[in-house]
Each structure stands twice: as structure tokens, then as C-alpha cells.
Image (cartoon, rainbow, N blue to C red):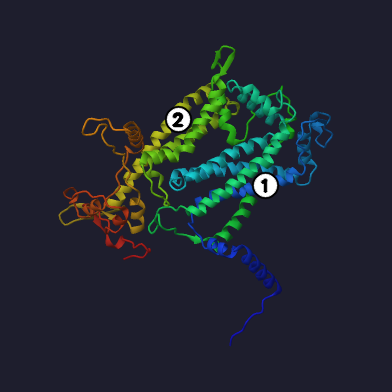
């Protein structure tokens, strides 16, 4: 017996609405295709989602704050509930910030949600970019998307700085004073640029309204547009995936967007929002009432910007103050230009252009959808760690006064220590990271050829003792042999057979030297012939070397270990069952 259920009125309305939209927009086909889009599953892919959900939290809380904040530098007398500041002259911006904190219901919670979300937004962007960098997710066809993400990071810095300066308290005012000094240090146009930004002599009367417009309208609009473009590229190029058996540049192993990732994304948003709200409710941040309204005369010790701007502060603190050059009637302030412009310019430019530099060095024009293991790209990994080391040294240098007061140390000794570390630290981090990567590659090579050590010792009848090795299964073996065997580029001679110098030789030579810098120190991956030789109990040296791909290597048979005894009971099939 067949029964049919009658649709409810709500179901009829929903079906009719969907049919109405589909007939006029064709959205049904788009939703159907997009809903079946496959995405790989790995926890590190959630770092980008944290950035997205933090930004949504910033927008929600920012709308609330905009309703009560007064972006004006007109002077008023404070008569609010905070007795320590009653009767003091301050700007309307600072007075409205105090009103938000003490008189508007939920205002302080929203302020702190907004601020914590901004910090987590920047932290998740930086961490997400680190994941993309170290795994090589920026390679073709994603170079443009890397630049989009890099631009989002820069815009996040600008958004954080502009919002941090809006309350017009002493701490944010000191940051603006530093900004004014950096702008004035620009040769020739510095003073004119400062007058344009501040509307006259610092601090002027128009900066807060201008920053307010930039903070709530211009930067968020650009960020929203770039986020949409970033996600469009993710869908267009398909998502990258970590290496493993069954995964290649021609497929994606994962789960469909609907219903798996729709449910995950919805739940994860509330989880991120809940953590931010919990932090805002329990941990005070930026208590402007303790700082007071901005006054250009006082500068307190221990003044710190948000963490993502500390590297600029540290760079300025490390630079000696006497580095000035007088040319005619102009003073070239190298003590400001170098730490505030040159150093960040080198760091950011190197980071933005790295995908193109690496592609130029390798000459690789293939599409890459399978990620690298960081150990298999020693130079890239070491370079990234050296950049992070320089960043963290500058962050610590920006807190040299706090380190001195908390640990009872000499601030001069601390400053000189960081001056030495900013040169030695990145170099040492690069060297030790590269050594570690090469060591891990050697370890992988030994595992592929000889298997896992078991600690079991077997004695033969002739008295020889042999350790039993456990072979790698197909999944383990594929993970350790799937990388490309990238070698330094070889170029044609400088002169042809007639002794004529070849056109373009200088560019090729430069490219070859760059390629040697990237790949001269490397560990050759195991070839199928080497694997067979290792399994042939001592015939390794008698066989010729071959260079077949990793797919052939995975099917080269069980892994033995030279004279090592293989225990057949320990070999595990790819599906996890014993043979």
C-alpha cells in the first residue's frame, strides 16, 4: 500500500518561492552545482574560516558601536559616571567612547568583542598565510589568490590601526604621533603629506572624522570585495589537498559542500563567535579610561600598540637615533626611514613576490593542487622560518621597556641584544631549519628503503644477528615518495659552436644561480630501482639507477631492507587489515 503526504502550507510557500527564483535567475542550477562541490577535510583549512568569521563578528559589533560613537575632535567637558575624569576637557570622540563603556547597556562588551575579534582576525590571517606558504599552496594557478590574501593582510593592518586610533586617548594619540613622525621623514614631500593627512599641524581637528570614514566604509568595503574574490578563486581553482595515496593534481578527495560543510561552517561560526564573546566578557582590553584623553605632552612608559603593529615599534626602537644625514637644507632621517619603511618594505615585498621568484627559479609551469610537505622544500621552509624569526625579534624589541621593568634588566643591554639578534637570528633560524628539513628527508628515505625499526633481534643458525624491520604500507610509502625531484636548472653554454655569445645568457645565468640557491642542497627521493635493490638483500650497488615517478614507486612491491629480515606478520594492507 502506497501512502502520500500532503505538503504543508509552509512547504508549498518555500517550493513556490524557490521555483519563482529559479525560473527568473537560474539559481537552482548554480546551487545544485555548488552544493556538490567537493572540499578536502583537514583542520588547518579552518584557519581561513576563523579569519572570515572573525571579520563577520567585527562587522556585527562595529554596526552597534557606530550608532553611539561620535567621530568629532570638538572639545567638551566630561561629566559622566567615571569620577576620575569628571571636569576634564576632552574630545567628543573620547567622551562618546567613555559613554559607550559605562552608560550604554552592553557597550563595553561590544567594544571588547570588536577589539578581540580584530586581534584574532589578524592572527588567523597570518597563521593561514603561514600554512599556505609552507605547504606551497601559492603555486600555479594560485599566485593571484596569494596576492589577494596578502592585500587582505595589509588592509587588516590598516583597519586595525585606524580603529585603534579612533578613541582619541593618550595611547592611540602616541601612535598617531609616531605616524606623523614617520610621514614627515619622507624626503621632500613628508611635511606636505603630514599637513594633508592631519588637515594642518598635528594633531589637527579633522583626523578622527577622516579615520572614521576610512575605518567603517572604505577599508571594510575593499576587504569584503577581496574576500569574495578570494573565495571565488578557491572555488574556481578547486581546493588544495594534503599529499596521500589516492590524491593527485587531477582529483579532490573530500566531502561535498552540502550538507557536510554547510553544517560544519554554521557550527564553527558560532564556536568562533562564542570564544570571542567569552574573551571579551572575561578579559579587559584597551581600558581607555585609565589612559585619559589625548594630550601631546605626556608619553607614558610601557605604551604598546596591538601585537600586529609591534614589529614596526620594535624596528624603530632598535635603530640608533644618530643616523641622520644633512643634505643642503634637508635632513634625511635614516633613523626613521630605514626602520619604518625599508625594513617593512623588504619583509612585505619578499613575502608578496615569493611565489613568482620560486616559479622563476624552478621553471615549473604545471598546475599544483597537491600540497608540499615542508620538509621536502628546505629552502622555502627555512626562508619562511627566518622571516618569522625576524618578525618575532622585532615584536619583542617593541616591548624592550616592559622586559626591562619586569625582569629588572638594563634596557640598553636588551636593545643591543636585539640589535645583534635581528642580524644573527634569521640567519641561524634559516640554517638550522634547512638542516632539520634535510635530516627529515634522509629519515624518510631510510624508512622507504628499510622500513620501521621494531627492536626485535633474530639470530640465524650461522650466529648472525639481524634486526627485524616492519615494512611501510602503501599509504606510508606514497607520502614519502610523492614529491617531485626538483634539481637546479641546467642552461646552454654562453657561446654557441661558432663562438658567438648567446642572447639571453645573462638572464639564464641569473636564473640558474637562483635555482642553485633553492635546490643545490637536496636529498634525492627514492627511485623504484633503489627500492627493488634494497629489497634484493645486497644487490643495491649492482643495479642501475632509474628515475620513474612516485606512482610507479608505490607499486614497486613490499619494502625490504637490504640484509634486514622482514617479518610478514607485521605487514599491513592499505585498508588497515593484516595480510
Tell me the crowding category of disc 1: few under 14, some 14 to 19, or many 20 or more residues within 10 angstroms, Cα based. some
Residue 425 is labelled as 2
Residue 36, percent from left and from top:
52, 63
Residue 268 seen anywhere in this rendered image of the structure: yes
Query: Is the C-beta separation of discs 1 and 2 under 8 Å?
Result: no
Give 507 or 421, whichever is nearer the viewer: 507
**Dot 2 surroundings within 10 Å: few (below 14), some, or many (20 or more)?**
some
Q: Quadrant of the C terminus?
A: bottom left
Query: Residue 194, how many percent across, how many down?
Result: 66, 25
Secondary structure of residue under mark 2? helix
Q: Quadrant of residue 166?
A: top right
The quadrant of the rendering that contains the N terminus is: bottom right
Depth check, front residue: 226 or 173: 226
In the picture of the structure, the residue carrying the numbered disc 1 is: 59
Question: Does residue 179 appear to the left or right of 145 in the view shown?
Answer: right
Spatial CA span between label 1 and label 2:
39 Å
- The image shows residue 270 at horizontal and vertical percentages of 63, 54
Badge 1 marks a residue whose secondary structure is helix
Question: For residue 437, which quarter of the picture?
Answer: top left
Amino acid at each position: 500500500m502506497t501512502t502520500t503526504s500532503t505538503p504543508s502550507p509552509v512547504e508549498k510557500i518555500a517550493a513556490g518561492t524557490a521555483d519563482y527564483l529559479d525560473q527568473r535567475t537560474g539559481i537552482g542550477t548554480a546551487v545544485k552545482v555548488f552544493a556538490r562541490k567537493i572540499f578536502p577535510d583537514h583542520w588547518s583549512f579552518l584557519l581561513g574560516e576563523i579569519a572570515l568569521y572573525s571579520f563577520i563578528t567585527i562587522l556585527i559589533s562595529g554596526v552597534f558601536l557606530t550608532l553611539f560613537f561620535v567621530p568629532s575632535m570638538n572639545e567638551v567637558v566630561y561629566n559622566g559616571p567615571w569620577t576620575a575624569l569628571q571636569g576634564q576637557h576632552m574630545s567628543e570622540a573620547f567622551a562618546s567612547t567613555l559613554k559607550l563603556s559605562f552608560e550604554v547597556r552592553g557597550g563595553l562588551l561590544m567594544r571588547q568583542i570588536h577589539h578581540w575579534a580584530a586581534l584574532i582576525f589578524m592572527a588567523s590571517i597570518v597563521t593561514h598565510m603561514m600554512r599556505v606558504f609552507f605547504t606551497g599552496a601559492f603555486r600555479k594557478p594560485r599566485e593571484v589568490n596569494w596576492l589577494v590574501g596578502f592585500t587582505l593582510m595589509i588592509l587588516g593592518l590598516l583597519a586595525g590601526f585606524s580603529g585603534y586610533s579612533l578613541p582619541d586617548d593618550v595611547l592611540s594619540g602616541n601612535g598617531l604621533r609616531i605616524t606623523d613622525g614617520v610621514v614627515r621623514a619622507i624626503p621632500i614631500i613628508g611635511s606636505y603629506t603630514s599637513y594633508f593627512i592631519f588637515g594642518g599641524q598635528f594633531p589637527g581637528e579633522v583626523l578622527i572624522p577622516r579615520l572614521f570614514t576610512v575605518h567603517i566604509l572604505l577599508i571594510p568595503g575593499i576587504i569584503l570585495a577581496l574576500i569574495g574574490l578570494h573565495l571565488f578563486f578557491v572555488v574556481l581553482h578547486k581546493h588544495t589537498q594534503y599529499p596521500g595515496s589516492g590524491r593527485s593534481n587531477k582529483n579532490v578527495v573530500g566531502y561535498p559542500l552540502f550538507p557536510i560543510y554547510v553544517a560544519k561552517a554554521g557550527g564553527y561560526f558560532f564556536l568562533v563567535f562564542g570564544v570571542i564573546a567569552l574573551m571579551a566578557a572575561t578579559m579587559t582590553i584597551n581600558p581607555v579610561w585609565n589612559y585619559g584623553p589625548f594630550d601631546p605632552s605626556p608619553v607614558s612608559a610601557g605604551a604598546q600598540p596591538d601585537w600586529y603593529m609591534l614589529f614596526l615599534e620594535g624596528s624603530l626602537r632598535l635603530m640608533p637615533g644618530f643616523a641622520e644625514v644633512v643634505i643642503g637644507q634637508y635632513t634625511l632621517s635614516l633613523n626613521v626611514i630605514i626602520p619604518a619603511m625599508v625594513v617593512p618594505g623588504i619583509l612585505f615585498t619578499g613575502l608578496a613576490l615569493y611565489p613568482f621568484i620560486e616559479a622563476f627559479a624552478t621553471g615549473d609551469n604545471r598546475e599544483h593542487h597537491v600540497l608540499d610537505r615542508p620538509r621536502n622544500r628546505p629552502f622555502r621552509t627555512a626562508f619562511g622560518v627566518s622571516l618569522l624569526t625576524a618578525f618575532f625579534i622585532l615584536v619583542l624589541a617593541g616591548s624592550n621597556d616592559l622586559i626591562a621593568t619586569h625582569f629588572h634588566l638594563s634596557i640598553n643591554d636588551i636593545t643591543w641584544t636585539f640589535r645583534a639578534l635581528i642580524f644573527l637570528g634569521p640567519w641561524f633560524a634559516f640554517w638550522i631549519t634547512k638542516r632539520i628539513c634535510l635530516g627529515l628527508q634522509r629519515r624518510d628515505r631510510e624508512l622507504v628503503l628499510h622500513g620501521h625499526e621494531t627492536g626485535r633481534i633474530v639470530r640465524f643458525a650461522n650466529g648472525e644477528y639481524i634486526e627485524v624491520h616492519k615494512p611501510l604500507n602503501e599509504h606510508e610509502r606514497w607520502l614519502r615518495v610523492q614529491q617531485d625531484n626538483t634539481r637546479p636548472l641546467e642552461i646552454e653554454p654562453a657561446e654557441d659552436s661558432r663562438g658567438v655569445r648567446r642572447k639571453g645568457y645573462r638572464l639564464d645565468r641569473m636564473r640558474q644561480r637562483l635555482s642553485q640557491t633553492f635546490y643545490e642542497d637536496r636529498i634525492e627521493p627514492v627511485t623504484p630501482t633503489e627500492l627493488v635493490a634494497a629489497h634484493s638483500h645486497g644487490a643495491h650497488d649492482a643495479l642501475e639507477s632509474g628515475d620513474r615517478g612516485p606512482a610507479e614507486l608505490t607499486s614497486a612491491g613490499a619494502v625490504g631492507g637490504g640484509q634486514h629480515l622482514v617479518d610478514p606478520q607485521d605487514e599491513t594492507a592499505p585498508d588497515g587489515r593484516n595480510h
